[in-house]
Amino acid sequence: MEKTLALIGSKWKVLILRELSSGLKRFGELHRGMGGISQKMLTQQLRQMEADGLVRRRAYAEVPPRVEYSLTATGRSLEPVLAAVAQWGQRYLDTQGHPERSGENPA
Amino acid sequence: MEKTLALIGSKWKVLILRELSSGLKRFGELHRGMGGISQKMLTQQLRQMEADGLVRRRAYAEVPPRVEYSLTATGRSLEPVLAAVAQWGQRYLDTQGHPERSGENPA
DNA sequence: CAGAATCCTAGGCGATACTG
DNA sequence: CAGTATCGCCTAGGATTCTG
């Protein structure tokens, strides 16, 4: 539980997961794909996720460097969980948008 | 999704949720129940969760102050989600065996 | 292009003291 | 007992620069 949170508890990790769930991507692609993250952060998060076995990194020793990232099986196995979280969030926002008078605030 | 993480993304919130899932508790009880949290943090987290509609706070204007916390329906609705997360984590630890990630918490 | 190294700042969070 | 207010450390994380 706390372990899981440590693995994906940051917003960046979740965003990376989402980006990569649509398939393999290069570093710059990833970087551009999710505005607002510094490349330092991106690199750092990716490294951790790689160490945690969620992401696979494939580097090609070419002159213009090319590094591709993709989800491992473990990483993909998170999708249902994230979906559950997302669904709950959706419902939460929904509920909060339609407040029902059920006598919520007693005395 | 990000919204949900904002609501429960911290380890403390999750622990509070767990504590309260076993029923209503007083402040000090909560405080003792989950070692390692400062009362400032506890208060702060509780206030946020209250504002987010996850927790209900009931204060009694008595001479020895008594404040009781419990989960709202919304808070309880998180349980399945948290269970899913916990289950995934359990499986992860199982699969990975003993995942010792370096740089996590150097003693 | 991908990333490592450096610098620097806001603020998260713990510890402590005070109050009703 | 259940907070609030204050101080101060520490590190997360952004911006910038350099390299292969």
Image (spheres, coloured by chain):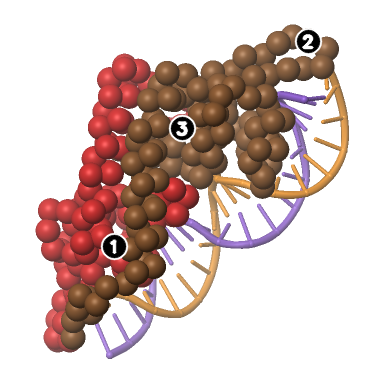
Chain colours: A brown, B red, C purple, D orange
Q: Position of residue B49 (x, y in %)?
A: 33, 63
Report whether B20 appears left or right of B8: left
Quadrant in the picture for residue C14: bottom left
Task: Kindly identify the amino acid type of the residue bearing the numbered disc 1.
Answer: Leu
Q: Quadrant where the N terminus of chain A lies?
A: top left
Report whether B7 appears left or right of D1: right
Q: Distance from label 2 to label 1 (Cα)?
A: 52 Å
Foreground of the two, B28 or B90? B90
Numbered tag placed on residue B54 in the rendering: 1
Query: Are discs 2 and 1 both within one chain?
Result: no
Indicate whether A78 appears above or below D11: above
Q: Residue furthest top?
A: A61
Task: Kindly identify the amino acid type of the residue bearing the numbered disc 2.
Answer: Glu
Indicate whether B75 appears above or below B81: below
The answer to whether residue B10 shows anywhere in this view is no
N-term mark: 3 or 1: 1
Q: Which residue is mark 3?
A: B104
